[in-house]
Amino acid sequence: MTPAELVPVPYTWVLALSAVLFAIGVVGVLLRRNGIAIFLSLEIMLNSANLAFAAFAYRFAAGHATAAAALDGQIFVFFVIAVAAAEAAVGLAIFIVLHRLKDSIDVDRANILRW
Amino acid sequence: MLGSLWLIPILCLAGAMLNLFLGALKAPKPLVTVVGVGSIGAATVAAYGALWEYLHQPYAQIIERYFTWISAGEITVNASLQLDPLSAVMVAFVTFVGFLIHVYSVGYMHSESEAGYARYFAYLNLFMFAMLLLVLGSNLPVLFVGWEGVGLCSYLLIGYYYEQAWCAAAGSKAFIVNRIGDLGFLLAIFATFAVFGSVEFSEIFSTAAGHPHQYAGAATIIALLLFVGAIGKSAQIPLYVWLPDAMAGPTPVSALIHAATMVTAGVYIVARCNVFFRLSPTAMLVVAVVGGVTAIFAATIGLVQNDIKKVLAYSTVSQLGYMFLAAGVGAYVAAIFHVVTHAFFKACLFLGSGSVIHASSGEQDMTRMGGLRKYLPTTYWTFLAATLAIAGIPIFAGFFSKDEILARTFAAGATDLNGYGDIYRVLWYLAVAGALLTAFYMFRAVYMTFHGAFRGGEEAEHHLHESPRSMTVPLIVLGFLSVIGGFLGFPGQLFHKTGWNLIENFLHPVILPLGEAHGAAAAAENGSHAVSLGTEWLLVGISVAVAVFGWLIARRFYLGDGAFALPRKLADRLPLIHKLLFNKYWIDEMYGALVIKPIHQTAIFLWRVVDELIIDTLVINGAAFTVELTGDVLRFIQTGNVRNYALAVAAAALALAAVLW
């Protein structure tokens, strides 16, 4: 196949996928009680955001001559991945401590910090 | 000494500071005496040295600038002193009389504690500093520093016996009443700066005198505001009430501050700013009316008082009234002349009364005295000389000055000064009546105190003794001056020799000529030549006649076998008038009901309702209570369940998205 035959995926499709993933993540965070499951949902939300960044980078690169402008969104993705890793480390540490205290990682049982 | 005028007040200030220090150390009294009296002695020498040089140089006005005191925007105020004829006269008698009273105080205060003795001299020296600054200052702000300083020292010294509540209260009363006047003075300074752009005497007076019509309106306002200050400081109606109470202080203080010097500051400021007053017929009339009415009003109260110092206090208020009357008819020289002679004879009277009080172990009630002539001969003769002077018996000091005031008031009435001739004529009648009363109440005091039999009981009689040398020497000097001091202002025009009137000629440069022929000024300046020589002699005759008449009534009432019977009969015959005078017209009670009580009630209202109820309870505690209540309700939102929080975050994000859509 020649390059002319390739039809690019419209970026709106990618954004739609990102939105669907984000909604799935939100529902997971709100409905699940298992800490690890919440975490997984959270990662889905972050990755949906990464997808949106990549889609916009692709969309806005078209009008720009320089490579730097096209890379903005992609650089953000790397930042998000790095921060998500750090956040996962902290979060998992919290769940380990929670497990020691309550013998469970059910977040509904971690409710003593209130009025 | 000329060229370092600052030395005169600074020496007094140094004495004050040193004495405060010595008081803290409880230093022995002789040391305090040396510092206290010595510093004033040195200041007196410095002052007379400066005056000697001043008289032997050609300029009428010497201004010494030391440094810029205030410099802000267009305002520049120099710390500067000036010596001109008016300052010279004031400095001459203030330092001299002040020194004598310091000497007298050594004897009078000898039984005080070390700390109290040093405190007394520190305050007295500080007073001298402030008073000299007042009379030497070459602009209104410097004068005002002295003006406030003498008020402060007056307060401190009235409340000297502060352990007694009524003395402390009298001090506060003097201070508060003076504040009312000082507000007027302060506004006058602001007004002067607003109108002239300067506060230096040498500039504002020449500007105003040069353009009389242009500045007539401003001059009225400034003059009246200054006079408000003068009313407070010089105890005129309606602010005179503090002076009789000021007698709570030690007697030498009454002599120095509340008779000879500080209370004449009001007369000084009117004489100093005579240009403004001469530009304003209204201001002159106000000054004359207030002075004339005060003169007779205070004299009537003095008629029936039994406390020897109260009699002298009301007499001082009355004499100050005469000074303002003189200023109000344009006779500024006569006013200052009366200030000087009054300083001599009233200081002598007060020191004499101090000697009497000292001798009779603190007794001030004249009904418990009598016959003291035998025990206190020096006090008696000096007191008598001063009484003759204040009563206006010829050749004694007060005669010349008071006669001059009466003559000039009569002339103001006769020449229809500023078109207010009728009012001035009434004031002349009041002044003559006041002179009669003055002679009566002063001789009444002499007869009740020194003549007849002693009425204080045998116990007190044993203690009677003449005062020590340190007290009698100042008495003798002041008594002597009460006799001859009047020749400073000998009415030479009666003998076609105007050169004989030393003080008139000396003070002449202070009365600046006004640029254009101005009605008020022209009439005032011609006042002394307005009536014929025959009339003047007749006026002299009248004033002598009323003085002698007052003396004779007092003699008939209070001397000899029937003493006290006649006045008692008169009091029984006219109980209402006697009660009215004896209770001082209930003025203090009236002020209490009309001014003090409403202010007190308002203060209570502000305290109980506005402060305690509205501010404390409603605003401050109310705010705290509201916050607490809100928190109590809202804290239930914090469930501790992370999924609730997550739901809230998601819902909020959704809401935000909806809004932004």
Image (cartoon, rainbow, N blue to C red):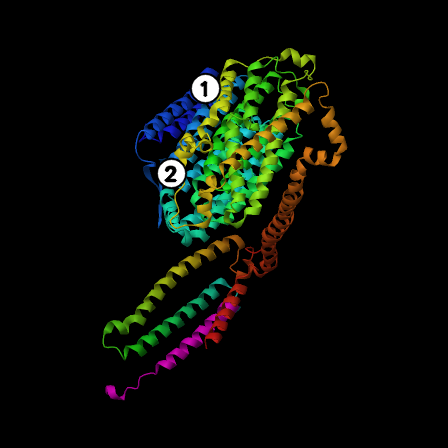
Q: Is residue B646 left or right of residue A72?
A: right
Residue at 63%, 12% in the rendered image: B463
Which amino acid, mark 1? Answer: Val
Which sits in the foreground, B174 or B385? B385
Q: Measured along the vertical axis of the image, is residue B379 above or below residue B317?
A: above
Q: Residue B32, labelled with which disc? A: 1
Does the segment drawn in magenta span residue A19? yes
What stretch of residues is rendered in magenta? A1-30
Local secondary structure at mark 2: helix
Q: Measured along the vertical axis of the image, is residue B582 above or below residue B467?
A: below
Which amino acid, mark 2? Answer: Pro
**Residue behind mark 2:** B509
- Report in which chain the residue with disc 1 lies: B
Q: Position of residue B407 (x, y in %)?
A: 52, 37
Q: Is residue B101 visible?
A: no
Q: Position of residue B632 (x, y in %)?
A: 61, 56
Q: Residues within 10 Å of mark 2 (few under 14, many from 20)?
A: some
Q: Position of residue B642 (x, y in %)?
A: 52, 62
